[in-house]
Image (tube, helix red, strand yellow):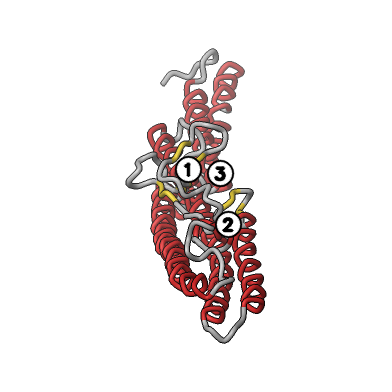
Amino acid sequence: MALTLNHNMMAMTAARNLSINYGNLETSVRRLSSGLRIGTAADDAAGLAIRELMRAEVASLNQGVRNASDAISMIQTADGALGVIDEKLVRMKELAEQAATGTYNSDQRLMIDSEYQAMASEITRIANATDFNGIHLLNGNLSSDTHDGDALTSTGKMKVHFGTGNDCSEDYYYVKIGSATASSLGVGNASEEDDGHNISTQQGAQRALDALNQAIISKDKIRADLGALQNRLENTISNLQIQAENTQAAESRISDVDVATEMTNFVRNQVLSQAGVAMLSQANSMAQMALQLIGG
């Protein structure tokens, strides 16, 4: 290579290599300080696209876990209220059994029936008052076989969505809860067409015993359906958590930096940058050699 004044090619080459190595050093510093292998699309365009899809999947799965957990809380609320209703029905059957015997007169049966009706009224009050986040659970609002979610307020049975898509066989369940009011169960004066409407007579009390058996069975069926659905939701939560964990692991392998490997790159780039600075300094001094020849 000729010794020239106008163009210092060795300095230009050293500067170009220094720029490359310094850029690589900057990338290593960014990756080590952020913990991310992919910080910009330029790092890995395909990897970035896959990572963002996986992040969306993980976020959706985690929200699905929360949705299913909320549904379990709702079911437990309904089941707790049905447990209280169960106590009232047991007491009503006890009163019907008492009134069915012939050792009580009409006045005493009327007093027994007064408590019987009070229990029925309390069942209806509990059924109408039990709600979760403003959604009434036991008054029949969720007893329909159909679901309509097109309006601002959904009607019919409740849809609990936990999956990341919209497949009816994979991504959501329907929660259907029958009415548990006294009239729906067929007991109390609100159900005068049924056998269990009062126990003011001996015959009425005897008929009420069968009606109360049916009421307890109807109530237990609601509780059994809720219990089965709660078990399904608990299994769903476990499955969603496993999916989220494995998807997060896959996203980590794509996105996160391997600290050991990147630290090796950092040290190499650091040494190359230091060498580039030293060589650029030496290359810039080459012009002084030409001046010495001129001066000589």
Task: State the separation of the CA atoms marked 1 and 2.
Answer: 24 Å
The nearer-to-camera label among 3 and 2 is 2
What residue sits 66% from the left and 70% below the top?
114
Judged from this view, the residue extending furthest toward the left is: 169
Query: In the rendering, which numbered label is found on residue 294?
Result: none
The residue that mark 2 highlights is 190
* Label 3 residue SS: helix
Judged from this view, the residue extending furthest toward the bottom is: 103
Task: State the separation of the CA atoms marked 3 and 2.
Answer: 76 Å
The residue that mark 3 highlights is 29
Residue type highlighted by circle 2: Ala
* Label 2 residue SS: helix
Residue 259 shows in the view: no
Residue type highlighted by circle 1: Gly
Q: Are marks 1 and 3 in contact (CB under 8 Å)?
A: no
User: Can you give x and y, in whole percent of width and height, for residue 251 in the image?
Assistant: 42, 47
Quadrant occupied by the N terminus: top left
What residue sits 40% from the left and 57% below the top?
236
Nearer the observer, 185 or 116? 116
Label 2 environment density (alpha carbons within 10 Å; few <14, some 14–19, many ≥20)? some
Residue 2 shows in the view: yes
What residue sits 64% from the left and 59% below the top?
125
Judged from this view, the residue extending furthest toward the front is: 106
The residue that mark 1 highlights is 156
Residue type highlighted by circle 3: Val
Quadrant occupied by the C terminus: top right
The nearer-to-camera label among 1 and 2 is 2
Q: Are marks 1 and 2 in contact (CB under 8 Å)?
A: no
What residue sits 47% from the left and 40% below the top?
38
